[in-house]
Image (cartoon, grey):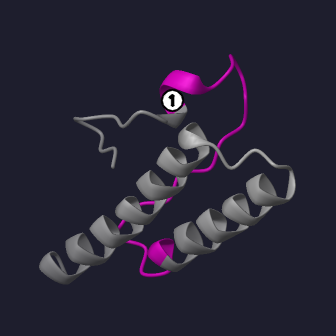
Amino acid sequence: MGTKNNPGDFDCYANAEPDEPMFVLLARDVQAPLIVRQWAFSYRQRKVAENQWNEQAQKKYSEALNCANGMDRWHLENR
């Protein structure tokens, strides 16, 4: 799971193209964990359907779910 101080393997800032639009969700948004989980499940379905469910895809999926869980924990601890 990535944070501001410790970016993850799939850090959007590091991977973004110059001037590429991006949307960032923060743990303080109570809807963020749900949205991240929805993205992860959709990502997994697409990769499986495209026969691209490989180690890299599984790692990205797991990182997204870990991020959602971390967001839940952060929100509970910082209300």
Above or below: residue 4 compared with residue 71: above
**Left or right: 19 as drawn, with respect to 78:** right
Q: Nearer the viewer, residue 45 or 40?
A: 45
Identity of the residue furthest to the top in this view: 18
Identity of the residue furthest to the left in this view: 77
Q: Residues within 10 Å of mark 1 (few under 14, many from 20)?
A: few
Q: Residue at x 68, y 20 (%)?
A: 17
Q: How many marks?
A: 1
**Left or right: 45 as drawn, with respect to 73:** right
Above or below: residue 25 compared with residue 78: above
Residue type, label 1: Tyr
Helix, strand or loop at label 1? It is: helix
Q: Is residue 31 magenta?
A: yes
Above or below: residue 76 compared with residue 51: below
Residue linked to disc 1: 13
Q: Is residue 16 magenta?
A: yes
Give the overall secondary structure of the magenta segment: loop
Q: Position of residue 33 (x, y in %)?
A: 45, 74
**Left or right: 51 as drawn, with respect to 74:** right
Q: Position of residue 71 (x, y in %)?
A: 33, 69
Q: Picture quarter containing residue 67?
A: bottom left
Q: Nearer the viewer, residue 61 or 14?
A: 61
**Left or right: 23 as drawn, with respect to 33:** right
Q: Residue at x 65, y 42 (%)?
A: 22
Q: Residue at x 44, y 65 (%)?
A: 65
Above or below: residue 13 compared with residue 77: above
Q: Nearer the viewer, residue 19 or 7?
A: 7
Q: Picture quarter containing residue 7?
A: top left
Span of residues in magenta? 13-33
Q: Residue at x 81, y 49 (%)?
A: 51
Q: Position of residue 11 (x, y in %)?
A: 46, 34
